[in-house]
Amino acid sequence: MTATTKVNVAFAESSRPTVYDDAVKLVWRPLDASGGVREIVRAGTLAANSHNTQPWRFTVSDTKITIGPDFSRRCPVVDPDDHHLFASLGCAAENMVQSAVMLGFKAEAKFEAANPDSITIALDRSQPSNTELANAITKRQCTRAEYDGRAVSAEDLNKLSTAGTLDGVECLLVTQPHRMDAILDYVVQGNTAQMRNDAFMKELIGWIRFNDSMAIEHLDGLTARSSGNLSLPAWLARPLLRFVMTEKGENDKYAKQIRSSAGIAVFASATNDKSGWIAAGRAYQRFALLATARGIRHAFLNQPVEVDSLRPQIASYLGIGNRRPDLVIRFGRGPTLPPSLRRPIQAVIDQP
């Protein structure tokens, strides 16, 4: 039994860690070169995903892995057409393709129009090879903190742009302060609209894990400490939330975070359909892995693309015509925060 198997059995038998930092070490441990196909799945579960809902299911054989949606984990208010859900599947697919190289496989991700709800990862054996992207998989995180305001070098910007351009997805980098302030205006408008939407707030709060115990119990969701917030008992945190998480406070926070960033990246796919959303997720994930390898942090700013009335406005500002802006992130150099947790692979693998 490999170290990977032992860890997942431990989680499955509920003998999980009681200390958050210990859980982090298990979830985000380095990839196990002896882990085989199931370790590729574990790499997939470490991908970015909306609200850390982990909305995926995997079917595994010796020659392929199929990634499908788990609609029981969808967010119908913030993501009514499942755009973010399918982008999350794309993120998982890219992690799996990148990890396969390290784990002794050549992997190719395929989206078949005949089965639009799934992605197939075709596998062939090959010699293991370390790459900077594969090594970044267990280090990547969305860092919701202020950065240090330093510019990213032209060389790194060029590499990030190249990494984020994949399968017809355009990666637009915005580094001019006046243009970043213009995007900030859209973020503030989007955040304001969402915070005034009771259904949105109810859905968001349902995915917040207010303390370490909740995070370890669920192994999903938005952990307080991963957002830079205090870990509090749920009975105390829930009633306090409306006083702490205010419209003005959140908007001011986003203003500080964006103005401390080196730039903003917008990912826009060629088509506004599941294949395009998956491609946008893959492109973002590759960008995120390269950024991580270069010591560059990032975090999502998706409010303008989540509010229907704002989406065409920011698309017009960015000059992308009728294309849908899929994902918006800020990036820069700064500290790390405690990572979020993930469910064990037993919880996400279906029998073929």
Image (cartoon, helix red, strand yellow):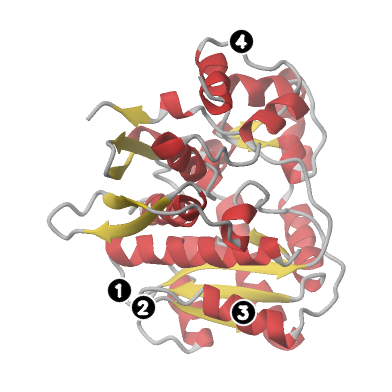
Is the residue marked by circle 4 packed among few (<14), some (14-19), or many (20+) residues within 10 Å?
few
Q: Residue at x 52, y 85 (%)?
A: 318
Mark 3 Cα shell of 10 Å, populated few (<14), some (14-19), many (≥20)? some
The residue lying at 47 percent from left, 77 percent from top is 165
Residue contact at pointers 2 and 1, CB within 8 angstroms: yes
Of label 2 and label 1, which has the lower sequence position? Answer: 2
Q: Which residue is mark 4?
A: 15
Which SS class for mark 4? loop
Amino acid carrying label 3: it is Lys
> What label does residue 168 carry, if any?
2
Residue under circle 3? 159
Between disc 2 and disc 3, the foreground one is 3
Say what secondary structure mark 1 lies in. loop
Horizontal and vertical percent position of residue 26: 65, 29
Indicate which disc, 4 or 1, sits on the residue closer to the N terminus. Answer: 4
* Secondary structure beneath label 3: helix
Amino acid at circle 4:
Ser
Residue 128 locus on image (x, y percent): 49, 52
Marks 4 and 1 sit apart, C-alpha to C-alpha, by: 45 Å
**In the picture shown, does residue 38 fall above or below 85?**
above
Give the Cα separation between the discs numbered 3 and 4. Answer: 43 Å
| Circles 4 and 1 in contact, beta carbons < 8 Å | no
Which residue is labeled 1 in the image? 271
The extreme front residue here reads 127
Query: Can you tell which quarter of the image residue 254 is in?
Result: bottom right
